[in-house]
Amino acid sequence: MSLSDAACRNAKPNLKSYSLADGLGLSLTITPSGGKLWRMRCRFEGKARLLALGQYPDVSLAKARERRDEARRQLADGIDPGAAKKARKELKREAAENSFEVIGREWFAKISPNWAPGHAKRVKAKLENDLYPWIGARPIADITAPELLQVLRKIEGRGVIETAHRAKQVAGQIFAYAIVTGRALRNPATDLHKALTSMRGEHFPAETEPKAVGALLRAIDDYPGSSIVKAAMRLAPLVFVRPGELRQAKWTDIDFDTAEWRFTASKTKVPHIVPLSVQSLAILNNLHPLTGHRGIYIFPGDRTPLRPMSDGALGAALRRMGIGKDEHSVHGWRATARTLLDEALGYPPHLIEHQLAHAVRDPLGRSYNRTSHLPERKLMMQRWADYLDELRAGAEIIRLRK
């Protein structure tokens, strides 16, 4: 006689375990502690088997019968239901261990110690806010390009196009890590080339027209504020480092004999060399009597020489000069140099990228060290300084045809 749900619900424990039969090998075992366990008796390859199908009421009578019928179909096909269940558990375990989030956190833990704290914080936020909630639990090997694109489209939908592009870049690095560690076969991020809305313009406003750059340089020369801020504003276009690197420049990192500024790049955390032009050295020599004996920083803050200039000082100086936030930024000098060194002076991109402290690799995939192409970069930096002088003087400079 088949069981009913009421019979299952009302079954009471005894001093010993006993079973209530349902049919076709299925039964409900009631333990002395009150547990109610679904069991199925069967034979596979002549050997008796007892399959565990779950616990009542978590697994209902109807669900237990479905599992019994599935086991019977497997037996008919020559499959061991017990082994099949173990295989499914193993697959689930492997899927959980190889999820996008698990591998993403492993990748982040390995690579983030080499980053600046601010950069690491931003990458972690992208992962936890934009990627993990949607694909974090998915086995990384199962994620497809359309699935990743759907996630990135959610970011685009918020109107933050650059964030979507950066999220795609981060996801691509995690997929690449999964491939080299043997947990994925392909990188779906590489299939999304041009699938996202293009970013328009530079993230940091930058002036790249020669005449306008000349006018900007003249405005800096006429800046009426602090002499320390003015010196930093004049040095910024000559060295085109990141604003934080400029503000935190130390006198001990300047080698006047070799005309070099050596420091660790804030974003890539790798040693970097900035060849100093005659014009750059003149600015530093003029500033040294003022700040060279006050502390370690070339551009100290107003309140104490023990700390560098505040991160808003240079931007505030541009605003005081009447240069709007959408016209030019201190960081924008990097885009100015990248554009004009290429288009106006004709320098090869790899030299420019080296000088920008970007991760440049040779054809074999090896990173160049900080001294790569240093003689050529010294010549380039001096030519760049001379070029800026020409623009400041109002010379007519025609861009090279490409």
Image: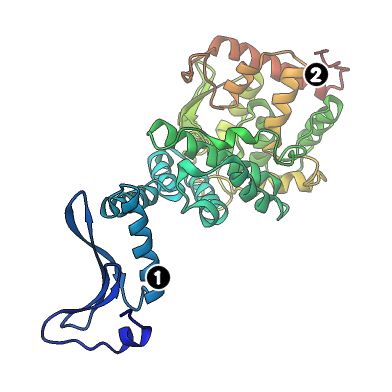
The answer to the question of whether label 2 and label 1 lie on touching residues, with beta carbons closer than 8 A, is no
Q: Is residue 361 above or below residue 307?
A: above
Q: How far across and down, in percent of the image, does residue 9 sit?
A: 32, 86
* Percent position of residue 322, x then y: 83, 46
The foreground one among 263 and 38 is 38
Q: Return the residue nearer the eye: 98 or 50.
A: 50
Which image quadrant: the C terminus?
Answer: top right
Q: Which mark is residue 390?
A: 2
Assign the N terminus to one quadrant of the image. Answer: bottom left
Question: How is the rendered protein coloured?
Answer: rainbow
Q: Upstream in the sequence, badge 2 or badge 1?
A: 1
Q: Nearer the viewer, residue 251 or 155?
A: 155
Residue 293 visible in the displayed image: no
Give SS at disc 2.
Answer: helix
Name above or below for residue 397 compared with residue 87.
above
Figure check: 67 above or below 17: above
Q: Mark 1 belongs to which amino acid?
A: Lys
Residue 63 has which mark?
1
Image position of 117 (left or right of 70):
right
Q: Secondary structure at mark 1?
A: helix
Q: Is residue 298 left or right of residue 21?
A: right
Q: In the rendering, at what x and y percent does residue 292 appear? A: 51, 34
Question: Residue placed at 79% from the left, 29% from the top?
Answer: 208
Q: Which residue appears farthest toward the front when viewing the image? A: 1
Q: Amino acid at mark 2?
A: Glu
Which class describes the residues within 10 Å of circle 2: few (<14), some (14-19), or many (20+)?
Answer: some
Label of residue 107 in the image: none
Whole-Å distance between the Cαs marked 2 and 1?
83 Å
Figure quadrant of residue 43: bottom left
**Image location of residue 106, percent across then percent down:** 38, 44
Q: Give the residue displayed 26% in from the left and 73% down from the top.
A: 27
